Image (spheres, helix red, strand yellow):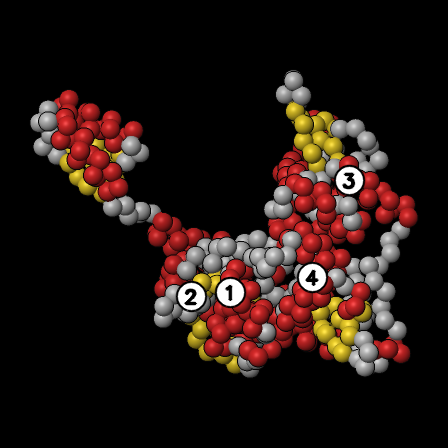
Amino acid sequence: MPQVRIIAKNFMDMVASLPAMKLDNLYSNAFICEAILRSLPPLAKKYVLQMLCIDGPISAKSMQEWVLADGASKHKVAVDRLLQLRIFTETVDRKRETSYRLNPVFQSNLQKLLVSGEVLPGEPLPSSITARLPSLEELDVFAIEQWECFMLQLINSSQAERPSNISSSTMKVFQRGLLTQRDKEAPRLTESGFQFLDRGVDPADLISFLLELSFHVTGEAYNISSLTDIQRETIKDLADLGLVKLQQGRKESWFIPSKLATNLSMSLTDSSSRKQGFVVVETNFRMYAYSTSKLHCEILRLFSRIEYQLPNLIVAAITKESLYNAFENGITAEQIISFLQQNAHPRVAERIPSVPENVTDQMRLWEADLNRVEMIPAHCYDEFPSREVFEGACEFAREGNGFLWEDSKKMRLIVKAEIHKNMREYLSRSK
């Protein structure tokens, strides 16, 4: 069983985590502004467009009047996202009234983009230079195979069919950021997140390149010589991940973006871009996955028991033992439920709920069983010479943040093991 920590952050969370100065530098590029706008929740997009030609701040009370009463939660999500990305700046006056205004750099560049139109970051190479390019279907197959091969190596390297397709440099990058390996243990994903930005490359420069890449045309060829040195090094890793395909001509070399690259800045809330699901969960905890992908099989193995696998069908069972293994490896019940809901087969995706409630409730209960009791090393003290000494010891434990429990009638005290030495010294002085 591979030990895996699910990575919670998505691409736009990476953008939001940049320092304020780097975010402002990103917004000096009009393409970045448009990419960020495309990624926002629908209500957040509406706010940006409504305030695009307003130079001054808008009070929070005024903005609340823009939505109906039942839209309060969506309003909060939209405003929080805009603040995280520094598209909104928040001010509080002396009367403690909050107001918001658009980031002036973001606002100015987005206005210019809407007025002047957009120009692609790079023009595609003519067919006379590139000769035959892969079809969109061939490009999709390449992208999926590369991405699945890479993911299989992260989850379970023994299941990867073509480990040679992923360069050693790319795996080392992700091993530094995502994998830790102890003696005689398989590599495992950690909670450190998507950390392939630690090679002396400015995160803002890399994010800027990735977002610009999303405006290229899928299947078209773009000259590699038009890229900077950093971008030329990065494009090799992106090819390993299936975001682009590299080709070499007689004189020129070029890259061809796949859908993985051009969809980078698409809104996460856009239901039209949702992929087709493949999982059916029944009330008896049996699970049927209509897939030929080994990656899907290994993901399901993280939290279920695979019973048998046919050429296009995986049959599994969600058991208490399989879930306990998942919980021990850092996977939560909510993450598993979310995965099953997002990948529900079309036949059950429209049902409410798409995953039976008895299954989701039981998964949460099994997780709660593990979290119900917390084991803390501790020491118990009794037979105090006087109540004064007992009460003083209790107060000492509280001040040292080591107090756990007391029985004032029988004068018993339990403290954390970490303050045991200090407690003994205190009691010695008290005697």
Is residue 196 visible to us here? yes
Q: Which residue is rendered at x = 59% and y = 74% of the image? A: 166
Q: How many badges with numbers are in the image?
A: 4
Q: Name the residue under label 2.
A: 181
Badge 2 amino acid: Gln
Tell me if residue 431 comes above or below residue 153 in the rendering.
above
Q: Residue furthest top?
A: 95
In the depicted view, which residue is nearer to us: 350 or 340?
340
Spatial distance from mark 1 to mark 4, Cα to Cα?
Answer: 21 Å
Give coordinates of residue 157: x percent, y percent. 49, 74
**Mark 3 / mark 1, whichever is N-terminal:** 3
Spatial distance from mark 2 to mark 1, Cα to Cα?
Answer: 9 Å
Give coordinates of residue 133: x percent, y percent. 80, 78
Badge 4 amino acid: Ile
Q: Name the residue under label 4.
A: 230
Residue 254 found in image quarter: bottom right
Quadrant where the C terminus is found in the figure: top left
Name the side, left or right, on which 335 lies relative to 329. Answer: right
**Mark 2 / mark 1, whichever is N-terminal:** 1
Q: Which of marks 2 and 4 is in front?
A: 4
Of helix, strand and loop, which one carries label 2?
loop
Tell me if residue 240 comes above or below residue 386 in the rendering.
below
Spatial distance from mark 4 to mark 3, Cα to Cα?
Answer: 25 Å
Residue 348 found in image quarter: bottom right
